[in-house]
Image: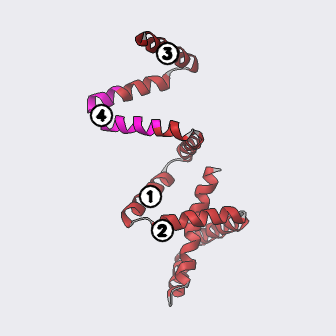
Amino acid sequence: MIARVLAALALASLLARPALAQSEPGAGDDARARWERLSPEERQAFRERYERWKALPEDEKARLEARLERLRALPPERRAEVERRWRAFQALPPQERQAILQRFSRWRELPPERRAQMRAAFREILEAPPQERARYLENLRRWREMSPAERDMARERWRQERHERRR
């Protein structure tokens, strides 16, 4: 779903630029010139994206157009950063993009309180001295290498230790 939304947002961006350009005097010529410079493959890909856009439900189109307007309303520096990150995301191999989208989907499913806790923890890590940050990253690497059973055992051990410290 998120991949579809991101693709549709990119498509909306591409579609909106020519439409807006045509509303300016003499700008239709510029849009036509850009179209003429496209290779036949790029034109075909654009036509296919346009067909996918047309097939979207109207409420989804409206939601995507609203997001596009929010993007356009950002200050230039912030918008440039968003666009830079989008290009970096698009440059990733498909498997990495899929993994990121899955993690993002899980993130969005978290309750707001849990997301706030995690943001605070991330901020704390980023602001930590280099040695502490390195220790955290090493622990994270080891955690990722653990099997689910090993993780469960580690969690239980931490719960017991925390419980004993509270006594």
Q: Nearer the viewer, residue 69 or 38?
A: 69
Asked if the residue at tag 2 contacts the one at tag 3, i.e. Cβ–Cβ closer than 8 Å, the answer is: no
Q: Is residue 51 visible?
A: yes
| Residue 38 horizontal side relative to residue 47, left or right | left
- Magenta stretch bounds: 117-135
Count neighbours of disc 2 (C-alpha within 10 A) and say few if under 14, some if 14 to 19, many if 20 or more.
few
Q: Secondary structure at mark 4?
A: loop
Q: Residues within 10 Å of mark 1 (few under 14, many from 20)?
A: some
Mark 3 and mark 2 lie on one chain; the one further toward the N terminus is 2
Q: Quadrant of residue 165?
A: top left
Instruction: Identify the residue position indicated by label 4 in the image.
Output: 128
Q: Amino acid at mark 2?
A: Arg
Question: How far apart are the alpha carbons under marks 4 and 3?
Answer: 24 Å
Majority SS type along the magenta span: helix
Q: CA distance from mark 3 to mark 1?
A: 40 Å
Identified at 39% across, 60% down, the residue is 78
